[in-house]
Amino acid sequence: MRKIALVLEYDGTNYYGWQKQPDQNSIQAELEKALKKVYGVPIQIAASGRTDRGVHAAGQVVDYKFYNKIFVPIHKFHTIINNYLPKDIKVLSAQFVKLGFSSRFYAIAREYSYTINSRDTVFRSNFETYNSFKLDFDLLNEAAAKFLGEHDFTSFSKNNKDTKSYVCEVQKSHWTKIEDGRFRYHIKADRFVYSMVRSLVGFMIDVGRGKRQADEIESLLKTKHRDFTSSLAPPEGLILQKVYYPKDTFNNDSINYESDFNEV
């Protein structure tokens, strides 16, 4: 028995999220179908985390066990899998890992981006959220800085019965200006809770348009009350950019990330 880790990117527009669901299209189901064609037997995969319906990934990491031999070098194996995947899902790299490796539980941090655009264009509509309000870039960053550090994000998440703690340590939280009216939010944390990034972005958009105050954030983090936050931002602007692991986890320095999303 051996274990392989894959890095993949996908456009989540046409899927009901990562996780397999009865009678619904999912990224996990498509990848498992492709692996079954490669190996000739069912393969069960686990991911570093679940992305919601319509959310994308530039660096999702998955792992699975297998018994069969592979007949191509491991550094070329991802090209074989891609022959059986739809065009909106692509495996970027494959690597052998130790049997005890878990893409989810070995992860020490994850990084997301969220892009908003004041121009409503079909050429970016799958990956950016159209925003009709004029936003103050400095106010966006003033709000983003409030989320840095360790906080309980109950107020900025959806309730999930399986979540035992809503405490997350945010290591990066800032906006960059790509061009006039087009901004990208960058956030990195040791863990994320359900719909956390979309909740943060929804609140910061309200701050940027002058509807809310950045100073409200400290109170909301302390009160742990979801009823007083803003609406969730839509899913299409959200991308799981990268999953971080300890340096000695893999055979080389890191898993290979090749996505253009890191430079767009």
Image (spheres, grey):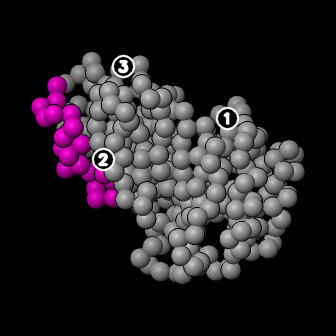
Report the residue at 81% width, 72% height from top: 211
Magenta span covers which residues?
A: 69-92
- CA distance for labels 1 and 3: 27 Å
For the N terminus, which image quadrant?
top left
Report the residue at 58% width, 64% height from top: 176
From what the image shows, is residue 39 above or below residue 113?
Answer: above
Question: Which label sits in the foreground, 1 or 2?
Answer: 2
Asked which secondary structure carries label 3, the reply is loop
Q: Say whether residue 81 is magenta.
A: yes
Report the residue at 71% width, 33% height from top: 165
Say which mark, if any, is on residue 100.
none
Q: Which of marks 1 and 2 is nearer the N terminus?
A: 2
Q: Where is residue 152 in the image (x, y as percent from the top left)?
A: 76, 40
What is the crowding at mark 3: few (fewer than 14 residues within 10 Å), some, or many (at least 20)? few
Q: Give the residue type that dot 2 points to.
A: Leu
What is the crowding at mark 1: few (fewer than 14 residues within 10 Å), some, or many (at least 20)? few
Q: Earlier in the sequence, mark 1 or mark 3?
A: 3
Q: Position of residue 191 (x, y in %)?
A: 61, 38
- CA distance for labels 2 and 3: 21 Å
Foreground pick, 86 / 217: 217
Q: Give the residue type that dot 3 points to.
A: Leu
Asked which secondary structure carries label 1, the reply is loop
- CA distance for labels 1 and 2: 31 Å
* Residue for badge 3: 99
**Among the 4 quarters of the image, the one containing residue 47:** top left
Q: Which of marks 2 and 3 is nearer the N terminus?
A: 2
Q: Give the residue type that dot 1 points to.
A: Thr
As drawn, is 207 to the left or to the right of 14? right
Q: Where is residue 207 in the image (x, y as percent from the top left)?
A: 76, 67
